[in-house]
Amino acid sequence: MSSRIVLERSIKASPEQVWPYVSSPDRWLEWQGLEAQIDPSACGVYRVNIRGDGFACGEVVHAEPPSRISFTWGFDTPEHPIPVGATLVTIELIPDADGAATVLRLTQQNIPAMAGPVRQGWEHYLDRLVVVAEGGDPGADPTIAIR
């Protein structure tokens, strides 16, 4: 049995200001991970060493700047219950009426039941994304395995 999660965050910035944080490796690393390779074009690579103990990997399947990016997602470590490319992550950036704020909606599909706390991980990292996209510093990530 697989599951799906949908998470939303409100960000006090326009979609154009938020887009680099979900499409550029340097900006992505401000809120998640130690290493990143992200090519936000169709068939581009998505590869992020989130905590220092393996890479989340996949392929960009759709990119529509500055409103939507979708990529397959899983881990390159054989013992992880989500193999590379097994799930699909879609991040949508939806402007509010005046364009001054953005609703970020993350949807992840096909999550295996035994995959554990995927939702909690995204909750943690999306909170960090809000801080950096609004111009703040989220501080050191307490979940990093390697210091």
Image (tube, rainbow, N blue to C red):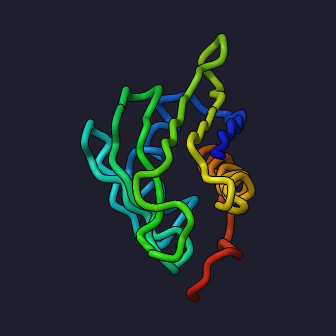
Residue visible at 33% across and 60% down? 37
> Height in image: 53 above or below 138?
below
Residue at position x 66%, y 28% from top? 103
Question: In this rendering, would 120 be left or right of 56?
Answer: right
- Residue 20 is situated, as x and y percent measured from the top left of the image, at 43, 43
- Left or right, 132 with respect to 84, comes to right
Establish if 140 lies above or below 64.
below
Q: How far across and down, in percent of the image, does residue 113 sit?
A: 68, 54
The quadrant holding residue 81 is bottom right
> Is 65 positioned to the left or the right of 109 in the image?
left
Residue 1 against residue 65 in the figure, above or below:
below
Does any portion of residue 21 appear in the rendered image?
A: yes
Pick out the residue farthest to the front.
1
User: Residue 84 in the image: x percent, y percent?
Assistant: 41, 59
Q: Residue at image x 52%, y 68%?
A: 50
Please count the marks in the image.
0
Q: Position of residue 98 (x, y in %)?
A: 64, 13
- Residue at the (48%, 73%) spot, across then down: 34
Q: Nearer the viewer, residue 129 or 88?
A: 88
- Looking at the image, which is closer to me, 62 or 79? 79
